[in-house]
Image: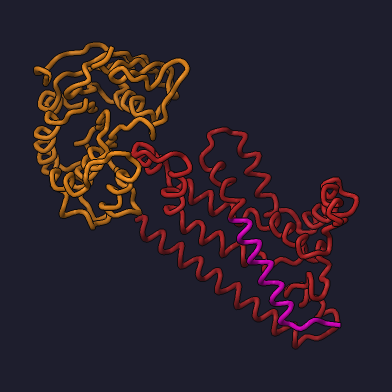
Amino acid sequence: MDSPISVVFATTAELAFVTTILLLLTATPLAWWLARSRKWWKEVAGALSALPLVLPPTVIGFYVLIALGPASPLMVPLHWFGVRTLAFTFTGLVIGSLFYSLPFAVQPLRTAFEAVGDRPLEIAATLGAGPLDRFLTVAVPLSRRGFISAAILVFAHTVGEFGVVLMIGGSVPGQTEVLSTRIYTLVESLQYGEAHRIAAGLVAFAFVCLFVLLLIERRAARISL
Amino acid sequence: MSGEVEAGFCGTLGAFSLDASFSVPAKGVTALFGRSGSGKTTVLRCLAGLERMKGRLTVEGEVWQDKSSFIAPERRRVGMVFQGTNLLPHLTVRENLAYAAHRARDALPLADVSQRTGIAALLDRVPSHLSGGEGQRVAIARALLIRPKLLLLDEPLSALDSESKAELADYLAELLPRLGMPVFFVSHEASEVARLAHRRILLESGRVTAIEALSPSPK
């Protein structure tokens, strides 16, 4: 009944990859607005986007599950396409991951955008660059380390998800089963050897991610001195 | 009136309040002169459109700002030289110049301008490898490249050591009077103003107290 480990690995990688791409696209405008706006109430959005840092994954999983379930009003438009629910599907898993990893994209991007400051953008404006032009040709290249950090953190954090993916995905073999939930299943059935292999692999992967991240930050600190 | 730069800006920035109006010929070099905190830089930023206060601004008959309109800085064609850092740090000197040239419809040839402003040898450097004086010269070259309708300089000499300060002052004294467009520069040093400007606008706590001619304006 178990699907091969390669399938579980591929599902995990695909989930992390799709989440990273979608989250960089959606978190970038949000982080830009949080970094640039002078309104105090922007921090309402700032706090909301940081909530997944402190909430139990089961809370996020629970609400996303309800929102994607057959009784949810959010699902009504999809009923026209014959989709009744996104719970226990890969798409549902991606949606849950987007919420769960949102702060890991927003925080580094916001910090990087804030570090750009007003001056380079004002220089670009007086040289004839409009808002979008300034963003793409000045803010983005000057924040590239923020983008790299955000991508690494989101990818690693998505691979490290457990509670949310279990609640929304249900660890359906071949569809929503990922490495972290496979370990859980293996341990439940006392297959410690196989669990060890995956767990040790995840430790090594997480270590490499964080190590690379620290090297990038160290370089950034050296350059700004 | 055409042939003039007519400005009036009114507003507050934190505890500072500005209420400054002036009209000067759209020719020659005008110094915005006053103590620190008098509002010189704010006026310059209003001219560039980087600060938006209530008021009006007309440059040679063209309305840049009034009650109902405000032209964004990127559409004003001003050459702005900021105090201190002026170059986009992720681009080389050549790329900094090209950034400006690409966005202007009829920029001057890059090679000519860099030749004339004496920065040809710096083109392939990155901004972090330029001295303060070199950075300012590149910024001036970049500003001239786009044939600005106004050239705005914010304390162009202030961030420099005394040697490069004297050098750049000589350079500006030679360059500025030859330029076709009106030049505004901010300074708190009377000697600098006397040497470089045709007239000066005196500012005190956000108000214009006098407009004085210093040397005959160019025809």
- Name the residue at 40% across, 59% down: A221
* Residue found at the very far front of the displayed protein: B106
* Residue found at the very far right of the displayed protein: A71
Viewer-side residue, B135 vs A51: B135
- Measured as percent of width and height from the top left, residue A183 is found at 76, 77
Q: Is residue B137 above or below residue A156?
A: above
Viewer-side residue, A217 vs A144: A144
Rendered hue of chain B is orange
- Name the residue at 62% across, 51% down: A26
Rendered hue of chain A is red
Q: Is residue B46 above or below residue B210?
A: below
Q: Is residue B160 above or below residue B3?
A: below
- Measured as percent of width and height from the top left, residue B184 is found at 23, 26
Q: Tell me which corner region of the image, top left, top right, bottom left or bottom right, holds residue B86.
A: top left
In this rendering, does residue B205 appear at all? no
In the picture, the quarter occupied by the C terminus of chain B is: top left
Please state the extent of the stretch shown in magenta in the rendering: A1-24
- Name the residue at 43% across, 39% down: A130
- Name the residue at 15% across, 55% down: B121
On the picture, is B190 further left or further right than B100? left
